[in-house]
Amino acid sequence: MNQAMFSGSVLLENAMEEKPAWAERLAGEGKLEKIKVKPPALWYKVVYFAFGYAALLFGVYLLIGGILYSSSIRLH
């Protein structure tokens, strides 16, 4: 799960790997230091980790339930 979806920021190492041209351009323009942020607190990481996996498990539960009970569902 990508933590950028919840925290709104990306590790510099990940940015350099995924989008090297963008990161180099920011560094060349001197904007990289201006947009650096502190990493999220540990409690925040725990909360969005738990929320993300709970949502994933709930989706799998609904999918399996829908498959198992699809024979008893009748559409008019």
Image: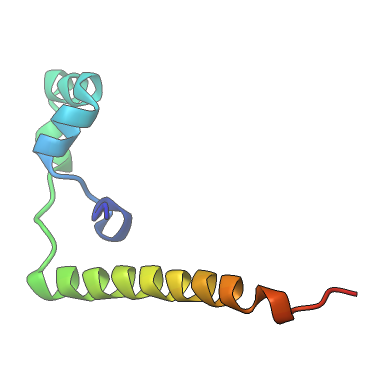
The residue at the far front in this view is: 71
| Model colouring | rainbow
The residue at 10%/57% (across/down) is 39
Residue 70 or 27: which is nearer the viewer? 70
Q: Residue at x 14, y 32 (%)?
A: 32
Q: Nearer the viewer, residue 54 or 63?
A: 63
Tell me: residue 21, above or below residue 68.
Answer: above
Assign the C terminus to one quadrant of the image. Answer: bottom right
Say whether residue 47 is left or right of residue 59: left
Query: Left or right: where does residue 53 sit relative to residue 35?
Result: right
Image-quadrant location for residue 5: bottom left
Location of residue 47 in the rendering, given as x and y in whole percent from the top left corner: 22, 76
**One can see residue 39 in this view:** yes
Snapshot quadrant of residue 71:
bottom right
Residue 15 image position (x, y, % from top left): 18, 34
Q: Looking at the image, which is closer to me, 75 or 48?
A: 75
Residue at position x 20%, y 45% from top?
Answer: 10
Residue 31 visible (yes or no): no
Find residue 52 and report its horizontal and vertical position in percent. 32, 68
Asked if 31 appears above or below 60 in the picture, the reply is: above
In the displayed structure image, the side of residue 3 where residue 65 appears, left or right = right
Residue at left offset 30%, top offset 70%: 53
Residue 31 picture quarter = top left
Tally of numbered tags = 0
Quadrant in which the N terminus is drawn: bottom left
